[in-house]
């Protein structure tokens, strides 16, 4: 079983839509959780960490469910500039485990 | 400026060549990593260094040889590669695991070296 699993998409949504991505992880001892964003042919960049109580940053909301071992990312009021691949990342000790990414395209 | 600099950005090499990828971080981090990103696959961890010591070798073929002379520099020496080794090679750094900053800042990646083996 993969360490981290994501729906690869693609998700094609109109501008202004709300879109949600889910990600599951296999190791219950995982310690830290992140969402990264990767633009085409660029390196991944940290979008937000995911805290146990859930956290929000502008239009982005991240949730963690340790009991079910999944994390989610909600994007409200999608912008064209949100088009990218969103990587779910799980950390345990010195290791980071990446999902394959979910591709999002926001359509005018 | 990401704080993690990789050179070269692009590299084309023959299967008999020897080349090296370089990574330098200016963030005061203590852990550095090499990742491989192939099309339609998740990032694959190759090597981890904590405080200059290699703590992880993820079953990487010996034609890839890492070197970490200090906490700020990381190299990946390449020799007799195969065409299937063509990929984007990403260097990353972080605070050593277990520190409070890890949750806030995660990894910082370099821009990567796009390697083509011909």
Image: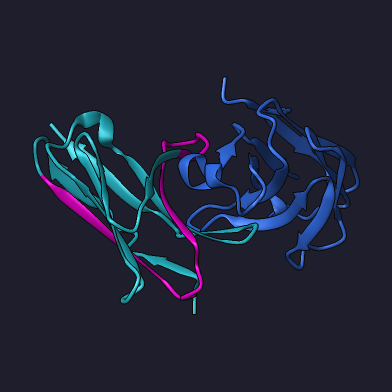
Chain colours: A cyan, B blue
**Is A98 positioned to the left or the right of B20 in the image?**
left
Location of residue A59 with respect to B9 vertically, above or below: below
Q: Residue at left 65%, top 50%?
A: B35
Q: Quadrant of the C terminus of chain A?
A: top left
Q: Residue at left 54%, top 41%?
A: B101
In depth, the one of B15 and A65 nearer the eye is A65
Location of residue B61 with respect to A13 vertically, above or below: below
Determine the residue located farthest toward the top in the rendered image. Answer: B1
Q: Position of residue B66 (x, y in %)?
A: 84, 48
In depth, the one of B45 and B8 nearer the eye is B45
Q: Residue at left 14%, top 41%?
A: A76
Residue A6 falls inside the magenta stretch: no
Q: Residue at left 45%, top 39%?
A: A46
Q: Position of residue A52 (x, y in %)?
A: 34, 58
**Is A72 positioned to the left or the right of B38 in the image?**
left
Determine the residue located farthest toward the front in the rendered image. Answer: B100
Q: Which residues are magenta?
A: A18-45
**Is B10 positioned to the left or the right of A107 in the image?**
right
Location of residue B21 with respect to A34 vertically, above or below: above
């Amino acid at each position: 079983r993969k360490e981290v699993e994501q729906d690869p998409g693609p998700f094609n949504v109109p501008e202004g839509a709300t879109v949600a991505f889910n990600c599951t992880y296999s190791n219950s001892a995982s310690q830290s959780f992140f969402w990264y964003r990767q633009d085409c042919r660029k390196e991944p960049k940290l979008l937000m960490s995911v805290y146990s109580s859930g956290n929000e940053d502008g239009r982005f909301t991240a949730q963690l469910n340790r009991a079910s071992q999944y994390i989610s990312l909600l994007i409200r009021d999608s912008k064209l500039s949100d088009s990218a691949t969103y990587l779910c990342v799980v950390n345990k000790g010195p290791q980071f485990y990446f999902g394959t990414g979910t591709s999002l395209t926001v359509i005018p | 400026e990401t704080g993690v600099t990789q050179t070269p950005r692009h590299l084309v090499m023959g299967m008999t060549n020897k080349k090296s990828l370089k990574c330098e971080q200016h963030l005061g981090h203590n852990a550095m990593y090499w990742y491989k990103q192939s099309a339609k696959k998740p990032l694959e961890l190759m090597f981890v260094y904590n405080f200059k010591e290699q703590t992880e070798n993820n079953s990487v073929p010996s034609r890839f040889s890492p070197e970490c002379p200090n906490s700020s520099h990381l190299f990946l020496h390449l020799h007799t590669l195969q065409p299937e080794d063509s990929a984007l090679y990403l260097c990353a750094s972080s605070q050593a695991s277990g520190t409070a900053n890890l949750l806030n800042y995660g990894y910082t990646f370099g821009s990567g070296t796009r390697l083509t083996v011909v």
